[in-house]
């Protein structure tokens, strides 16, 4: 009787663990579908649910930052980018988005620091860094002349 109980309990725990593991992926994938369909409210809800089940899911934080960028909520965008970079410091998309925010805020030293990091990790978006640095070089002399 005890063996049957233990086996039943073990089977129950394994099934629940598998459901929780797959549900996290499902939340992110559903959020991604909503994001691509430009249904940002639904996407945000699914990414937040994904984070509840897996707080170290850097992609969910990144997509939340993208949503807040679209909604022009810079404070929440920055918060989610910081979370992304804490979990995955070499996420080039998050670094690039952070550089753009720092550039908007005229935080040139932060842009330069992020650019150094970006140069080390970039694989796909390397040209974007050049554009930002060019914009920075155009802005800095104007800043010094004032």
Image (tube, rainbow, N blue to C red):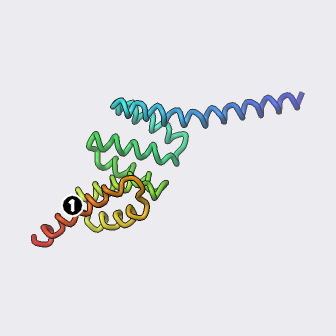
Q: Tell me: residue 45, above or below residue 130.
A: above
Q: Which residue in the rendered view is the most extreme toward the bottom?
A: 144
Identified at 40% across, 36% down, the residue is 44
Q: Which residue in the rendered view is the most extreme toward the left?
A: 146
Query: Neighbour class for label 1 at 10 Å: few (<14), some, many (≥20)?
Result: few
Q: Tell me: residue 75, above or below residue 38.
A: below
In this rendering, would 118 be left or right of 71? right
Q: Tell me: residue 89, above or below residue 77.
A: below
Residue 94 coordinates in the image, percent (x, y): 38, 52
Q: Nearer the viewer, residue 144 or 44?
A: 144
Residue 89 coordinates in the image, percent (x, y): 46, 58
Which SS class for mark 1? helix
Identified at 37% across, 67% down, the residue is 116
Quadrant the N terminus occupies: top right
Identified at 36% across, 53% down, the residue is 125
Q: Which residue is mark 1?
A: 135
Residue 40 coordinates in the image, percent (x, y): 35, 33
Quadrant the C terminus occupies: bottom left
Q: How many marks?
A: 1
Identified at 33% across, 55% down, the residue is 98
In this rendering, would 25 be left or right of 75? right
Residue 112 coordinates in the image, percent (x, y): 31, 67
């Amino acid at each position: 009787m005890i063996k049957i109980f233990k086996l039943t309990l073990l089977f129950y725990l394994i099934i629940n663990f598998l459901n929780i593991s797959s549900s996290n992926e499902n939340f992110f994938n559903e959020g991604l579908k909503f994001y691509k369909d430009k249904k940002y409210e639904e996407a945000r809800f699914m990414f937040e649910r994904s984070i509840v089940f897996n707080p170290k899911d850097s992609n969910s934080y990144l997509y939340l930052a993208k949503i807040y960028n679209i909604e022009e909520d810079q404070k929440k965008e920055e918060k989610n980018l910081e979370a992304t970079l804490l979990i995955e410091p070499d996420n080039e998309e998050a670094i690039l988005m952070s550089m753009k925010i720092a550039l908007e805020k005229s935080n040139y030293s932060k842009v330069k620091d992020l650019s150094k990091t970006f140069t080390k990790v970039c694989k796909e978006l390397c040209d974007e860094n050049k554009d930002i640095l060019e914009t920075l070089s155009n802005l800095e002399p104007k800043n010094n002349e004032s």
